Image (cartoon, rainbow, N blue to C red):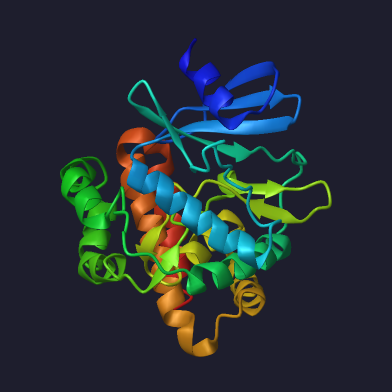
Amino acid sequence: MDSLSSVLLAYNLGHVTKTIPMTNGKSSMAWRIETISGPVLVKTVPSTAQALFEFALTQAIQDVDSRLTPAILLTQAQQPFISVNRKIYQVQRFWEHHPSAPTLAAALNCYLKIRKGLDQFEYDWQPQDPQPLQQLWQKQHPKLQQTQPAIYAHLVSQIESLLLLDQAQEAWVHGDLGRWNLLTMTNRQVGVIDFGQARRGPRFLDFAALYHGFMPRQRVALSVYTERFCCLAGISEGDRLIFLATVRLWLVKGLLVAVDKAPDAIKVFDQACHQVEQLA
């Protein structure tokens, strides 16, 4: 019996009709499994501590509203994961979703409800940021200095304040709330998936990720967009500066990741950073 069959047996999901490998995960393997009891997502998790954490966090969010994120299922032995051949697996409901892009209003409406669950969540164990700014900067700044000296010089002037902000552990955050982790449901409401990078972090980090995800390309529209975003997100005038600083943090981290993975995107991130700076 192969590993996936052993996993499905432990969850008593019934006859499998189709198995589809998923290739868009960043840090784990995943499969969409069609069963007679409905579709599920089977994914690997790096540790039992991470598996228990993701289950507890998902439960806290589901306690607010079960339509915000798919449930993580329990095995027949009432465990939120199973270990097979030295790998740890979790099984989660797979939500069918609409191909249309989510709207900003629907995304923020969903996240504000998730925020309630995150704010009420208490947990002793804390996952680490898989890509802290300090690590990214140390690794990438020599190459950035060589290939993009003007961008490097501009970042040097603000890196210390961004490093301090990145180290803040003010709130539980999703940690990777790009549009790739938003699902538009058939009723046009939005759900959020993949809490694999959830951790303590800057309180506006997820808002910053959403802000970037819906950011207009036209500079002239950015001020109006920012006002609308802050209104929908409930970000007060007094918090505007720290929010925009967190947006810059998100963009700078994206820029540094792009140094190796997508060099053509470096100038796009840099331009976005400059546009946001002009709002502050």
Who is closer to the viewer here, 279 or 60? 60
Residue 22 visible (yes or no): no
Q: What is the residue that sits farthest to the front in this orientation?
A: 77
Task: Identify the residue at horizontal 60%, vertical 76% (top origin).
Answer: 230
Q: Is residue 207 above or below residue 152?
A: below
Percent from the top left, x then y, of residue 112?
62, 70
Who is closer to the viewer here, 277 or 138? 138
Q: What is the residue that sits farthest to the top in this orientation?
A: 1
Q: Is residue 222 left or right of residue 109?
A: left
Task: Identify the residue at horizontal 69%, vertical 57% (top origin).
Answer: 66
Percent from the top left, x then y, of residue 86?
32, 25
Task: Identify the residue at horizontal 51%, vertical 38% (top origin).
Answer: 77
Q: Is residue 179 left or right of residue 165?
A: right
- Residue 105, located in which quarter of the rendered image? bottom right
Percent from the top left, x then y, of residue 15?
70, 18
Q: Is residue 250 above or below residue 131?
A: below
Q: Is residue 102 left or right of residue 264?
A: right
Residue 55 visible (yes or no): yes
Percent from the top left, x then y, of residue 243?
45, 75
